[in-house]
């Protein structure tokens, strides 16, 4: 490799060395509980995401108009075991359930069932999965997944029967209650206002670090003569 501009090349090497040194520091397990910088940042943003994903109070009000509204649907599952677990969920909510192989014929009060699902989601969101496990007698995350699959199938049936309001509320409960509770289970919820300073430092640091690497490459390429400048055109005499 031929160095054409020692000044630019030296600056590039210094910046690159500093960049790599900081990178080694970031991937070192020195950020509490044996986490490295990437794990710490990922954990923090997961906590912040959970803190801004609590919609249970609004959903509790939204499902009130559906209390007393009866429904009758058939839901097909992947296996008889899946159907059997789901039957336990619906029967606990007071619904009448008939299992036919891997399918369930479900009759019940839509509002009551949604209230149970929102309650389970709230418990899981607050990392009280043991309470859900005690209610149904099997793994809490599997129970929440069974609720999600059931609501998804029922919502599609409602939509095909032009019960659009009923379909919409089921989709909202899945999206705003079941999914956050399942995805963020056992993660501590933190509000953005509580970690505003550290979040700002991480975001600004990420931008600076990215620019730092860009300048390192720029000076190194300048040093070895690789530039993006247009070559000068020689004028013919």
Image (cartoon, grey):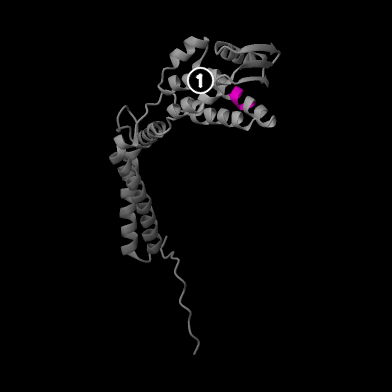
Residue sitting nearer the eye, 65 or 33: 65
Q: How many marks?
A: 1
Residue 1 in percent (x, y) is at 42, 60
Give the farthest residue toward the bottom.
Answer: 237
Could you tell me which secondary element the residue under label 1 belongs to?
A: helix
Question: Which residues make up the magenta segment?
Answer: 149-153
Q: Residue at coordinates 51% horizontally, 18% vertically from top-left?
A: 116
Residue 123 in percent (x, y) is at 43, 19
Residue sitting nearer the eye, 217 or 125: 125
Q: Which residue is mark 1?
A: 115
Number of residues whose C-alpha sits closer than 10 Å to that of mark 1, classed few (under 14), some (14–19) or many (20 or more): many
Residue 76 in percent (x, y) is at 68, 21
Residue 162 in view, yes or no: yes
Q: Tell me the chief SS of the magenta region.
A: helix
Locate residue 134 relative to residue 102 in the image: left or right: left
Residue sitting nearer the eye, 74 or 161: 161
Residue sitting nearer the eye, 100 or 80: 100
Residue 154 located within the stretch drawn in magenta: no
Q: Is residue 93 above or below residue 20?
A: above
Q: Is residue 9 above or below residue 59?
A: below
Residue 142 in view, yes or no: no
Give the farthest residue toward the left.
Answer: 197
Dividing the picture into quadrants, the one containing residue 145 is top right
Dividing the picture into quadrants, the one containing residue 103 is top right
Residue 194 in percent (x, y) is at 29, 34
Q: Is residue 98 above or below residue 76?
A: above
Locate residue 20 relative to residue 159 in the image: left or right: left
Q: Residue at coordinates 49% horizontally, 27% vertically from top-left?
A: 177
């Amino acid at each position: 490799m031929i160095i054409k501009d020692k000044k630019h090349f030296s600056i590039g090497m210094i910046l690159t060395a500093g960049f790599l040194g900081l990178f080694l520091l970031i991937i070192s397990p020195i950020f509490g509980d044996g986490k490295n910088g990437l794990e710490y940042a990922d954990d923090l943003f997961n906590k912040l995401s959970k803190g801004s994903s609590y919609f249970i109070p609004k959903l509790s009000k939204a499902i009130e108009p559906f209390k007393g509204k009866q429904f009758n649907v058939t839901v097909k599952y992947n296996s008889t075991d899946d159907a059997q677990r789901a039957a336990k969920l619906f029967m606990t909510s007071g619904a009448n359930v008939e299992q036919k192989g891997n399918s369930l014929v479900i009759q019940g009060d839509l509002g009551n069932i949604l209230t149970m699902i929102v309650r389970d989601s709230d418990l899981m969101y607050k990392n009280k999965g043991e309470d859900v496990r005690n209610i149904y007698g099997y793994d809490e995350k599997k129970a929440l997944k069974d609720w999600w699959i059931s609501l998804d199938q029922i919502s599609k049936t409602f939509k095909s029967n032009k019960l659009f309001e009923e379909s919409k509320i089921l989709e909202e409960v899945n999206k705003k209650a079941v999914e956050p509770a399942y995805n963020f289970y056992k993660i501590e919820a933190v509000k953005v206002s509580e970690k505003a300073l550290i979040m700002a430092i991480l975001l600004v640091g990420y931008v600076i670090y990215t620019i730092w690497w860009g300048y390192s490459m720029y000076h190194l390429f300048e040093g070895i003569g690789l530039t993006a400048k247009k070559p000068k055109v020689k004028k013919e005499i």
